[in-house]
Amino acid sequence: MISALKATPQRRGVLALWLLAVLFAFLPLRVALAADTAPPAADPVAEKRLLKLSEELRCLVCQNQNIADSHAELAEDLRREIRGMIQAGKSDKEIIDFMVARYGDFVLYRPPVKATTILLWAGPLLLMVFGMVALIRYLRQRNLRVVDDAPLSDADAQRAEALLNEAKNP
Amino acid sequence: MNKYFWILGGFAALVVLLAVGLGLNPRDVPSPLVGKPAPAFTLPVLAAPDRSFGPKDMQGKVWLLNVWSSWCVSCRQEHPVLVQFAKNASVPLVGLNYKEVRGDAEFDMSKIPAAEEKRLAIGRANQWLGQHGNPYTLSVLDLDGRVGIDYGVYGVPETYVIDKAGTIRMKHTGPISPDVLAGKILPLLAELAK
């Protein structure tokens, strides 16, 4: 690109033409891809359900994405499967159960509360309670320490007052 | 001193927890299918596509189902282990050829008609087995991956151990290493054979 910046105006024109040509060469491909993955507009309600369901489901290939976001092939297959089940009149629960039966609770972004997932659900709460207790204990100890401090002796108090007065009216 | 002990102790506990978490394999998702009946299917046999095969044909036998494909890189890694296993295997090893054509990004499926996909899949699968050896008693073709979904396949290769009653007893995701074979699969097979 650096050499392109140094190029003469004519050369720049040629470069621009090339860039345009390349852009247009890719244009039909992009349109074709979008058409492939575009939902059938016939039933927007079903598509909305598909989107909602697939946002709840984890893609097992790329584990930190849901099925709605993922471009992995398995996610595409599963979206197709969900679409088919919606068309067949299955309820959301039936569709989620279908996925859990095959891929386990791991497929759910909101796993059910069970013996195996209890730490997952209760862990943050436990940590918070632990933190609160620690904080309260610390604050109490500090308060005690402040109260416990020996009061100023009379001489010290007089000296402090004198210093403060001095500061106020120099 | 006591205060620092608690802080250090808490930190050490956190480190241990995270270290254990990092050591786990996130791909190792426990399959809900273990302990459940192997999902039924009827798929064409690779060597004789007009014949079909299903798990019910294996009733009363302990068998292995191995999911593979010619485009699957890790399958190449585990293949010698399977070939070696098949040489003195006591149980049938069935291959589930998973999305042979449409799983390969090389193909634009909108340009390949259904009949052509099957023909292509058979050609490619056979060529691959010819090249690397065929450990399978038979292989079946799951062209669209529909059976793969029923088995909860998410990363090829995967291997299932199915007992005489048709129940899945074990699932292994990823290539089978000699260690996994000797340490997990063979002992289970010996136990199931009783």
Image (cartoon, helix red, strand yellow):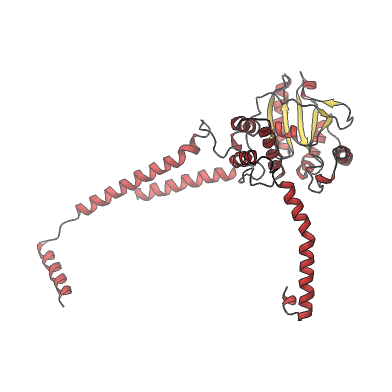
Q: How many marks?
A: 0
Residue placed most toward the observer, B158 or A111: A111
Q: Quadrant of residue B185?
A: top right
Q: Quadrant of the C terminus of chain A?
A: bottom left
Residue at horizontal 82%, vertical 42%?
B101
Residue placed most toward the observer, B180 or B70: B70
Residue farthest front in this picture: A42
A40 left or right of A93 in image = right
Q: Quadrant of residue A44?
A: top right
Percent x, y for residue B14?
48, 46
Percent x, y for residue B168?
69, 26
User: Is any part of residue B27 visible from this angle?
Assistant: no
Residue at horizontal 59%, vertical 34%?
A105
Residue placed most toward the observer, B73 or A19: A19
Residue farthest bottom in this picture: A8
B90 left or right of A61 in image = right
Residue placed most toward the observer, B94 or A43: A43
Q: Quadrant of residue A8?
A: bottom right
A19 left or right of B117 in image = left
User: Is any part of residue B6 visible from this angle?
Assistant: yes
Residue at horizontal 73%, vertical 80%?
A6
Q: Quadrant of the N terminus of chain A?
A: bottom right
Percent x, y for residue B128?
86, 41
Residue at horizontal 76%, vertical 63%?
A23
Percent x, y for residue A119?
49, 37
